[in-house]
Amino acid sequence: MKNTITKIMAGVSLSLALFTAKNVNAQTTPADKWRLGIGLEVGRPIGNAHDISNFELGGTARLQYGLSNKTAITLTSGYYNMFGKSYNQRFVTPNGVSEVTVDGKDLGIIPIKLGFKSFLAHRLYFGAETGAGFETTSLYADGSKNTKLILSPTIGYATKVIDLGLRYEGFFGQGNSYGLIGLRIAYGLGL
């Protein structure tokens, strides 16, 4: 799995380098303009989420409106899937202790986030988003699905065509808070 992820990251990095070289003079946040970005999200669950998953994969769409040439507001939504870990479970039987490998359950989340991007230097930006994450699967014995508060700071690099952002995403609420460290690779276009 790690080898596959490394190959994917290398391919994405090469693609980013090619797009960046092609669009050196492109303005990324024109004032009074709308942009749409379609992104692939990959991440590593942390906190309580690491107990159930080692890998997150998702897709998002981000609508962006330029307030100035250096600042934009954003609206992001999509789907995240934290793939369940396999784990060993022990059972006591009349013949002794038996161990069985159980496939963990995936955790699906629909995020809806409002945020901003502020360009600190040419193409380098800081972003922050807040919103709600709606769990689409239940990991709880009672079958409940929770809604979490999402807080997500990002540092990123954007051209006219590509947006690469490294972020922490925290999910808070109902006594079970967790997070992920993620990378968003997006293709952007003007509207």
Image (spheres, grey):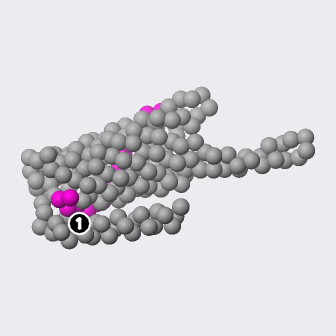
Residue in the foreground of this view, choosing between 8 and 119: 8
In the rendered image, the vertical position of residue 161 relative to residue 131, given as above or below: below
Question: Which residue is depicted at the point 53% across and 54% down?
Answer: 54
The residue at the far left in this view is: 32
Callout count: 1
- Name the spot of residue 26 as percent of width and height, x first: 13, 63
Residue 153 lies within the magenta run: yes
Residue 71 lies within the magenta run: no
| Res. 167 in view | no
The answer to whether 75 appears left or right of 99 in the picture is: left
The answer to whether 33 appears left or right of 79 in the picture is: left
Name the element at disc 1: helix
In the rendered image, the vertical position of residue 122 relative to residue 98, given as above or below: below
| Res. 57 in view | yes
- Name the spot of residue 15 as percent of width and height, x first: 30, 66
Dot 1 alpha-carbon crowd within 10 angstroms: few under 14, some 14 to 19, many 20 or more:
some
Question: Which residue is depicted at the point 39% across and 38% down?
Answer: 110
Question: Which residue is depicted at the point 28% across and 49% down?
Answer: 38
Residue 25, quarter of the rendered image: bottom left
Residue in the foreground of this view, choosing between 139 and 162: 162
Residues in magenta, as a range? 146-161
Magenta stretch prevailing secondary structure: strand
In the rendered image, the vertical position of residue 11 relative to residue 62, given as above or below: below
- Name the spot of residue 148 as percent of width and height, x first: 43, 37
Residue 74, quarter of the rendered image: top left
Residue in the foreground of this view, choosing between 23 and 148: 23
Q: Which amino acid does label 1 sit on?
A: Phe
